[in-house]
Image (cartoon, rainbow, N blue to C red):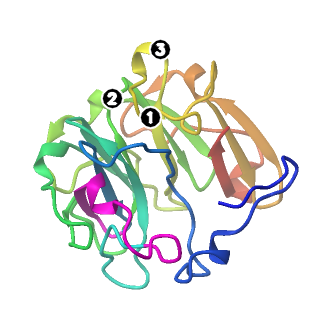
Amino acid sequence: MADTKWKDIGEHLSQTLTNFEQEEEIIFAEIVDQFEGVTYFAATQQGQIKRFERKELSPWRTYRSKSTKYAKLKDQEDRIVAVAPVVLEDIMVITKNGYGLRFNIEEVPVVGAKAAGVKAINLKDGDQVVAVFKSTTPSMYILTQRGSLKRMSQDDIPVTSRAKRGLQVLRELKSKPHRVFKAGPVFTDQGDFDLFTSQEEVGEQDQILQITSTTGQVTEVDVTQLSLSERTSNGSFVNDQISDQEVFTARIK
């Protein structure tokens, strides 16, 4: 990497990586000092999941100018929704149409970086995976596209096997149905953290979800302060206007 001044924004990856596509986004980054002994999981929007070893990404002859694949997508519409280090944890899968499935990562085989994965969840037609994360905390949050937010116990989704349909985490409505926009674990105390929990996943004290509507209105909610809701509850709207405006972006600060 080139040396830059502290006020410079740095160089774009496309300046050094010849195969960096225009639609690429960075979803995970870490500093490593060795490539042995660590395994990752990667999950796709179309419901595939795999495990692969970090040593598969050891520096190769052209690593400075060309990136390498770590997952195989089904088609051009598919994309990676999550990648993270994993040991023996349970994995939670949440879909857009409101289904949740939890299974242990040992059900997912370790394969090569360029190999396809296995089915994580049995998706209905028109459904897709929105979030996949390690189920290591007592609860999780779910935000819908209409701006409704809830916190629920992860135990409401019992551990079962992969490739099943899962259980509903939203109540289906005939008019203006809710669809999952974002979901993730709620870190309630220091005991919820593991070695791979990043500052991006949770702040030092709070876990603030910043929600921006399509009209630019910003609402911030500390998800750790939400009361627990039932599994099929649709939650509560974060403000009075959000249902009509709908959510444009949401992120944990």
The residue pinned by badge 1 equals: 185
Mark 1 burial class by Cα count in 10 Å: few <14, some 14-19, many 20+: many
Circle 3 residues within 10 Å: few <14, some 14–19, many ≥20: few
Examine the image and state in which quarter residue 51 appears. Answer: bottom left
Cα distance in 3D space between marks 1 and 2? 8 Å
Magenta segment boundaries in residue numbering = 46-67
The residue pinned by badge 2 equals 136
Residue 56 visible in image: yes
Which badge, 3 or 1, comes first in the chain's sequence? 1
Residue under numbered circle 3: 190
Q: Is residue 161 visible?
A: no
x, y percent for residue 123: 26, 66
The amino acid pointed to by label 2 is Thr
**Mark nearer the N terminus (1 vs 2):** 2
Quadrant location, the C terminus: top right
Instruction: Say if mark 1 contacts mark 2, CB within 8 Å.
Output: yes
| 9 left or right of 107 in image | right
Which residue is painted at 80% across and 55% down in the image?
Answer: 4
Provide residue 218's location: percent of width, then percent of height.
80, 45
Task: Tell me the residue at 23%/42% (across/down).
Answer: 37
Residue 197, position in %: x, y?
A: 46, 32
Q: Secondary structure at mark 1?
A: strand
Q: Nearer the viewer, residue 141 or 8?
A: 8
